[in-house]
Every structure is written in C-alpha cells, then in structure tokens.
C-alpha cells in the first residue's frame, strides 16, 4: 500500500484514516496545490495521545495547534515517503523461532504473500525503503499498532498503541513497553527494530507509519498491506510463559508430533498424534477460537491464564459451538470416529472453513487439539494421560459404586465413574494470582481439560489448575483444582444395595485404585515419562494421607474413611489375569481362593463376570458370567477359572476393546462378602513402517507399511490412513478384503522438507478391526551441500536454515 497524505477529505477516506481518527490524530490532504489541515474528532484526548506516543511525540505539538487552522501552503516536498516495507521474513523467522509457520513460508508468486509471525517481548526487524535517506536531524516517524478487527481500538484497553521512532536501540529496552528504534541507515533503506511489550495482546496487529519533518506538522501515512501475527514468547524472560530449559521448549513448543498414551493401567498403549501447529490455517483457527468462541477481549489476550481457560472451553461444543463435538455413544455415523483421527490439522482446517463443530472427539482428541492451539500461539503445552481416572460428579472426592446381590454394578444408581484412562493437557506459565505455597510459587505446569465433563462457572471447561496446588491438596485454588484432585486421588467405594428400605453395606474400600501411571511423552525421546509424583505423593505415604484429609476438610465433606482389616478374614481372594492378551485369542479369568484357617472348611459361593465397556467405564454389556460354589479345605487354595472365547466376546467389543471383570463372593460360615473388579484391554496389532534408505532433506525416500490380520476371520473394507513429515496430504490405501493370516503392504514416497526429527503415523480401520495404528520416528539428514563441517565425534554441523 502506498503513502497517503493524512487527511479527512473524501479523497483519502480509507481504513487507515479511520484508525488515525480514532487515535485523535490530525490529517492533511493534498488537493491540487493547496493543503488543508483538519483536527479530527478525537477518541483520545491530547494528553492520552501524548502518553500513547510514549512521552516524546514529534507530531504532538503541531496537532494541538491545528484546531482553528484552515487553508495553508502545501507541505514541503521533503517529507519522507515510505515506498515499501520489507518484513525480513527469513531473519525474523529464525530469531523468533517462527520460520516453520506456513504463513512465513509462502512464496507470494503462486499463492498469497508471506505473513509476518513474531513473538512478543522481543524486537523484530523491518526494512523501510524510502524516497530518500532518513535524516536523524530532520525526520520524525511514529508507528501506530491496532488490533486487527477491533471496531473501536483504545489505548486504555491495549488494542491501540503508538510509539515514536527512537534514535538508538537501547532506548526500547523496557520489557513492558512497546518501542521502535533505528538500527542503521543505508542509502534510501532504513532498518528499524520494533519491540512489542512482553505483555502485549496475542493476536493479529495492523501497523501504520506516520512520517513528518520535525519542523512542520504535515504528515504522510504508510500502512502495511497485511496484519502481522504476535505470539507468546517462552524464550523471553519477561513473558509469563517463559520456559528456561531449551530441551523442554523444543519439545513442548516446537515439536509438531507427540505420543498420547491410551489403553488401561495394565496395558499402556501409545499412539502418535500430529499437532501440526505450523500448518495452513492452524494459527488463524486458533486465534479465531480464542476470540470468537472463547470470547477473550483484546484487553485480555495477553494473559495466558485467561487465554488457556478460554481454550479449554472453545475446543468443546456443548455450550458454545466450539471446535469438536464429543461422542461416546459408539455410533459415529455422520462424522469421523475419534479413533480414526491421527492429528489436529484436519480438524482445525475443517473448523476454520465451516466454523461448525467437527464430528467427533473423545478425550485424547480434545487434548490433541488443545496442545495444537497452545503451541501455535506460543504457550508450552504437553498431553497428559491419567490411568484409572476418577470422574467425581458430587465433589465428594470419592467414586461410589453400587452392586446388587449378584455382584452386578447398578448403572442406574451410579453417577460417578472411573475411566480406564483420561487425557488432558498441561500448559506452562507463572501464576502470580495464586500467591506462594510452602513449596514455592504455584507457577510451572498448569492442568487444563477440554473434555466436557462438568461445568465450571457456567461453561464446560476446566483449569488452569496449578499441578503443584493439586499435589498439595489446595482444592480451593482457582481454577477447578477440586476436580483435578479427585481425578488422581479419589477413593473407590463399593456398596451392597438390597433395596430402598435397607441400609447400604460397605463391601470394599479401595484407597489405591485411582490415579496410576500419569504419563506424557519424554523430552526428546519417543518413550513414556511417568509424572505421577508431580500430581500426588506416594501411595501409602504419610504425606498422601495428610494431603487427602486436608482436601476433604476444604471440600466440607462429611465422608469418613473406612478400612477393612482382611487380616481377620480366614479366606483370601485374588484375581489373576494373563497379561498380553491379543485380539483374536481366547482368554481366561482366574479367581484364587485361599483358606488360611488350619481347622475349618469354608464354603464359598459367588460369580465371575466379564463385560465389555467403554473406556469411560460406562455402557457395560455382559459377555459371560459363571456362578460357582466351592469348598476350600484348611490351609489349601482353590481356583475358579472362566474361559472366554473370541466368538463370545468379538461381536460385543466396543471401539477400544476394553473389558471389565468382576467377582462377587460370600463365605457362608462367616458371611464375609468379597467384591473386586478390574479393567483390561486386548492388544491390537501394530502397523509396521520401514524406510528403504537413510532419509535426506529434500530427497525422496521409499516407505513401506504393513499389517498382519490377527483375527480368525477376514477383514473387510480395510483402509490405511497415513500422515507425516514430507507428506502434503493424507495418503489413503484401500483393501477390499484381508484374509486370515494375510499381511497387507503399501509403498509410497515421501520427501522430508527439513533435516532433523520427523515422524510418520499410520491408522488402519475395517469393519472387523479398527483403532490400529503405528508410527515411525526418524532423523532426516542434511543434504551434502548443506553440511558445513563435521566435528571429531561425527556430529554434523549444518546450515541453520536446514536444521532448526
């Protein structure tokens, strides 16, 4: 966009002029050889305009003198004219760690021009091409920043910022203030450094330049043709999301692929998830969700606490038409089954295009999208899995189960539940709003959860909750610490229900059953890191007991802990379940009954039950049950075995192949009642992925994927879905039928765009077998021409535009 004389005349009625009016500025218009200066109706008074311009404003005095002036001579022809602005995409992208954003990689020849993406609290460079050299002794320049899309931007709300161009770069070092300074002058080129405040709103900003002579009040304007994107900055010590450790920054901000753990506590199963935070439309969609769905005003878009709380609401859709529609019914017609997603990009692009909730999501899908948004806008984030995760609907810090006389769980009485696993997110930031604890401040990792489970302040959202506060039992701290505490620490209680006129009988109290193997992807490794100790003290420790009692008191719960002392029971029970059960195989459940009496024979009556169940612990369906009566001689043990065949369980399997096994038994002589249950999953096969050769940046390499049918029946309408680094669009390979024992393979070529870490992720679905996946993490080598040197230990040092 070219220069314009500042004017209110109809010949200059532009958006830029409207923005200039809103800042209380004056404009001038060249109409032939005459020049009319007009004082515009100001939305900011003169004093505020002065403050907006950072104190010294070379334009301020002439503006105040213009109120009663009408027609004067034309302005000097020497007023500096900006002809073009080079956004220094390559240099800024490298210094701000933003060069991988699709917005920054556009070439502008075939498609749209590149867009500048930078981080707050850190200066970025602009190269201004002018009609003559900038003269420090004669010229003055001001920069006006406005939040893109704001109807009435104001300085007080932080959506309108004006700064005068300073002579030297040391004059813009205040981290909490915007600033601009001359870096150097070379002929007609003026290179300046622009530094947004470390607390600035994270959004799109428009930028206008005003130029004038110090001796005159006439000004010219130049507007950047397109807005630039401003992100949070975990590299900046003054930013609330600052993260000091480089490996953690690389993992939780820059890495675009992760592992999300699913399964059950006795079968931890990782699956790959592509965040794709740098891909097309992802950043725009993220800002759209925060602004339009999360309804975060420009004033608060620089506050990571408010932004993350809004993200946790905007990704689900029950109350605000957010990004994803949750579905746990098992019927996914009209959408995509949650197990078929391999990443966030397709979800984000679909939502950005239609702005309607994408069908369908479950907890790990919600979490994958949340981390995509957080990383896209610059907030460090990672995905967390909690096994045996409590859903406490009553805020009692207990999960209560009611069973009938046959040991069957009574779903109609159960509002609480225990999920085989639940997935949420952590985001990194300081929490100045929470004060100081006995263990230091509450900053660091904060838990947020977008899965719509319970309402918080009238919306389906959760967090951010300080992980340290959760561990310390500070359940009254904002936000939603009580819910997070229950997810990892609640007690499991089983009650015998015999009718409304009879009292409940406590069957079993499990204080160790909730919150196991809390997991996330390890930093820089494709393996699991256990972070249970960051959420809770060790089970059975005094700290854990004290913390639980502290939390119960804060919750005003009247619940008292019960303990069963099984040392006085002469009959001991134990479940046995063979590990590593593969889908397609038969399996057995074994109950061990041991008589510890040296004199009495004990008669035990009971039942063993096997049910399929959703991973949320809901919607059970009986597969098989067996009633037994057995006499156990003194000092002996007996075993009750229940065999379940493939034919018995296959047609009742739910989408994630989860089972619940339970046992209810009564010792006749003592009337001692035993109840226990456990969860497990049958293991599905992995997709094998192999590279034909060592991958090299910008060179094609052949990839082979394969899968063995493990079922004793054919697979129909099989589909491979493949995504990864160097694959522009997801690859689809169809197989009409896969015979019993057959191995299917497909081969394709990919070209790694950059040297460094990369991944390939594959999914397989069919009528009979779904939720099968596989991934391969590999290291793409730099091209020979990009290698600058090799060190003695063979570590390759390559060009920085090839390796991040």
Image: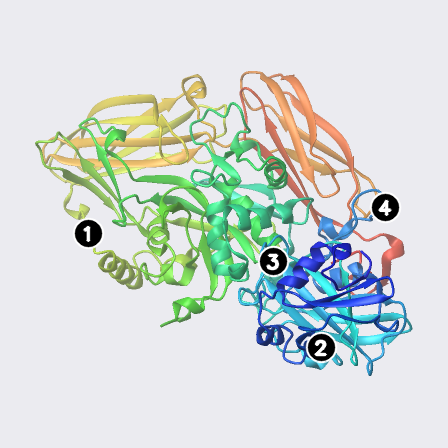
Gap in angstroms between the C-alphas marked 1 and 4? 70 Å
- Residue depth check, mark 4 versus mark 3: number of the one nearer the observer: 4
According to the picture, the residue beneath numbered tag 2 turns out to be 62
Quarter of the image that includes the N terminus: bottom right
Gap in angstroms between the C-alphas marked 2 and 4? 43 Å
User: Quick one: 53 or 15, which is closer to the camera?
Assistant: 15
According to the picture, the residue beneath numbered tag 1 turns out to be 561
- Residue depth check, mark 1 versus mark 4: number of the one nearer the observer: 4
The crowding category of the residue bearing disc 3, from other C-alpha atoms within 10 Å (few below 14, some 14 to 19, many at least 20), is: many
According to the picture, the residue beneath numbered tag 4 turns out to be 109
The local secondary structure at tag 3 comes to: loop
Gap in angstroms between the C-alphas marked 3 and 1? 44 Å
User: Quick one: 530 or 501, which is closer to the camera?
Assistant: 501
Gap in angstroms between the C-alphas marked 4 and 3? 29 Å
The local secondary structure at tag 4 comes to: loop
Gap in angstroms between the C-alphas marked 3 and 2? 41 Å
The crowding category of the residue bearing disc 4, from other C-alpha atoms within 10 Å (few below 14, some 14 to 19, many at least 20), is: few
Residue 599, percent from left and from top = 11, 38
The crowding category of the residue bearing disc 1, from other C-alpha atoms within 10 Å (few below 14, some 14 to 19, many at least 20), is: few
Quarter of the image that includes the C terminus: bottom right
């Amino acid at each position: 966009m070219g220069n314009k004389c500042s004017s209110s005349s109809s010949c200059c009625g532009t958006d830029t002029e409207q923005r200039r009016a809103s800042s209380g500025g004056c404009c001038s218009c060249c109409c032939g050889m005459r020049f009319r200066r007009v004082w515009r109706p100001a939305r900011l008074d003169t004093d505020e305009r002065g403050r907006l311009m950072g104190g010294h404003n070379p334009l301020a005095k002439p503006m105040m003198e213009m109120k009663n002036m009408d027609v004067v001579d034309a302005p000097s022809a020497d007023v500096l004219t900006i002809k073009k602005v080079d956004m220094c995409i390559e240099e800024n992208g490298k210094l701000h760690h933003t060069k991988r954003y699709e917005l920054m990689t556009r070439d502008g020849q075939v498609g749209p021009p590149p867009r500048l993406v930078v981080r707050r609290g850190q200066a970025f460079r602009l190269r201004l091409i002018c009609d003559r050299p900038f003269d420090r002794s004669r010229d003055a320049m001001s920069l006006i920043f406005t939040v893109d899309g704001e109807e009435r931007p104001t300085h007080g709300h932080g959506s309108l910022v004006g700064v005068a161009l300073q002579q030297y770069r040391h004059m813009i070092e205040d981290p909490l203030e915007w600033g601009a300074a001359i870096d150097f002058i070379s002929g007609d080129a003026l290179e300046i450094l622009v530094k947004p405040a470390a607390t600035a709103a994270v959004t799109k900003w428009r930028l206008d330049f005003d130029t004038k002579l110090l001796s005159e009040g006439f000004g010219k304007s130049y507007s950047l043709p397109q807005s630039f994107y401003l992100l949070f900055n975990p590299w900046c010590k003054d930013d609330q999301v600052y993260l000091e450790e480089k490996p953690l920054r690389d993992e939780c901000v820059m890495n675009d692929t992760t592992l999300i753990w699913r399964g059950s506590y006795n079968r931890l199963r990782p699956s790959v998830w592509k965040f794709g935070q740098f891909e097309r439309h992802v950043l725009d969609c993220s800002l759209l969700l925060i602004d339009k769905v999360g309804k975060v005003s420009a004033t608060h878009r620089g506050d990571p606490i408010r932004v993350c709380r809004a993200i946790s609401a905007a990704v689900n859709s029950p109350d605000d038409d957010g990004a994803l529609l949750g579905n746990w019914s098992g019927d996914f017609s009209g959408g995509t089954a949650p197990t078929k997603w391999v990443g966030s990009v397709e979800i984000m692009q679909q939502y950005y295009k239609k702005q309607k909730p994408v069908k369908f999501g479950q907890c790990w899908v919600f979490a994958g999208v949340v981390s995509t948004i957080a990383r896209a806008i610059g907030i460090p984030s990672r995905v967390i899995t909690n096994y045996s995760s409590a859903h406490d609907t009553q805020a009692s810090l207990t999960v209560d189960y009611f069973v009938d006389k046959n040991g069957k769980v009574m779903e109609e009485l159960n509002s609480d539940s225990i999920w085989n696993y639940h997935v949420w997110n952590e985001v990194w930031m300081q929490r100045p709003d929470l004060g100081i604890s006995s263990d230091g401040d509450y900053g660091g990792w904060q838990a947020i959860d977008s899965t719509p489970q319970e309402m918080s302040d009238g919306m389906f959202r959760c967090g951010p909750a300080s992980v340290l506060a959760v561990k310390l039992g500070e359940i009254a701290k904002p936000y939603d610490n009580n819910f997070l505490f229950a997810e990892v620490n609640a007690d499991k209680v089983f009650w015998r229900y015999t009718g409304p006129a009879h009292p409940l009988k406590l069957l079993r109290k499990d204080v160790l059953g909730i919150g196991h193997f809390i997991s996330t992807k390890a930093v820089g490794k494709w393996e699991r890191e256990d972070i249970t100790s960051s959420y809770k003290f060790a089970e059975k420790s005094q700290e854990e007991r004290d913390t639980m009692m502290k939390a119960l008191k804060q919750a005003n719960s009247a619940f008292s802990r019960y303990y069963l002392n099984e040392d006085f029971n002469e009959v001991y029970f134990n479940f046995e379940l063979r590990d590593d059960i593969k889908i397609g195989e038969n399996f057995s459940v074994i109950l061990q009954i041991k008589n510890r009496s040296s004199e009495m024979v004990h008669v035990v009556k009971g039942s063993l039950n096997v049910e399929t169940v959703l991973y949320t612990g809901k919607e059970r369906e009986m597969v098989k049950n067996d009633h037994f009566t057995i006499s156990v001689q003194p000092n002996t043990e007996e075993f009750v075995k229940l065999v379940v065949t493939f034919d018995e369980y296959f047609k009742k399997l739910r989408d994630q192949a989860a089972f619940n096994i339970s046992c209810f038994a009564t010792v006749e002589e003592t009337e001692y009642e035993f109840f226990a249950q456990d969860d497990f999953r049958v293991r599905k096969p992995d997709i094998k992925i192999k590279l034909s050769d060592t991958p090299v940046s910008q060179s094609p390499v052949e990839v082979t994927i394969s899968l063995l049918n493990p079922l004793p029946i054919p697979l129909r309408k099989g589909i491979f879905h493949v995504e990864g680094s160097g694959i522009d669009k997801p690859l689809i390979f169809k197989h009409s039928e896969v015979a019993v024992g057959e191995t299917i393979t497909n081969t394709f070529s990919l070209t790694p765009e950059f040297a460094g870490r990369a991944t390939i992720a594959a999914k397989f679905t069919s009528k009979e077998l779904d939720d099968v996946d596989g991934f391969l993490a590999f290291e793409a080598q730099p091209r020979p021409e990009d290698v600058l040197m090799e060190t003695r230990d063979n570590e390759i040092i390559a060009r920085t535009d090839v390796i991040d």
